[in-house]
Amino acid sequence: MVWHGGSSLGFRTHILRIPENRFTVVILTNRNEGDVAALARKVADFYLFRAH
């Protein structure tokens, strides 16, 4: 798993890559609140492990 996140006044971002699954989640928000890293992990978990 490879990830990178960032934030500034008014926005947050997070990119989560799982190369062995050829899967990427990108979260872009125009909010300062919330845990976008946790949201990206939940999305990955849903698609990779629960959707089958």
Image (cartoon, helix red, strand yellow):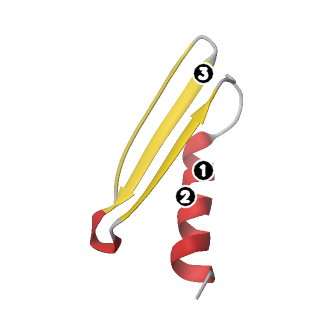
Q: Is residue 7 above or below residue 44?
A: above
Task: Tell me the residue at 60%/50% (across/down).
Answer: 38
Return the mark for residue 41: 2
- Cβ–Cβ below 8 Å for labels 2 and 1? yes
Residue located farthest toward the top when viewing the structure as drawn? 9
Q: Is residue 27 above or below residue 16?
A: above
What amino acid is at disc 3? Answer: Phe
Task: Tell me the residue at 62%/82% (across/down).
Answer: 51
Q: Quadrant of residue 46?
A: bottom right
Residue located farthest toward the left when viewing the structure as drawn? 20
Identify the residue position indicated by label 3 in the image: 11
Q: Is residue 8 above or below residue 3?
A: above
* Mark 3 burial class by Cα count in 10 Å: few <14, some 14-19, many 20+: few
Residue 14 locus on image (x, y percent):
49, 39
Identify the residue position indicated by label 1 in the image: 38
What amino acid is at disc 1? Answer: Ala
- Camera-nearest label, 3 or 1: 3
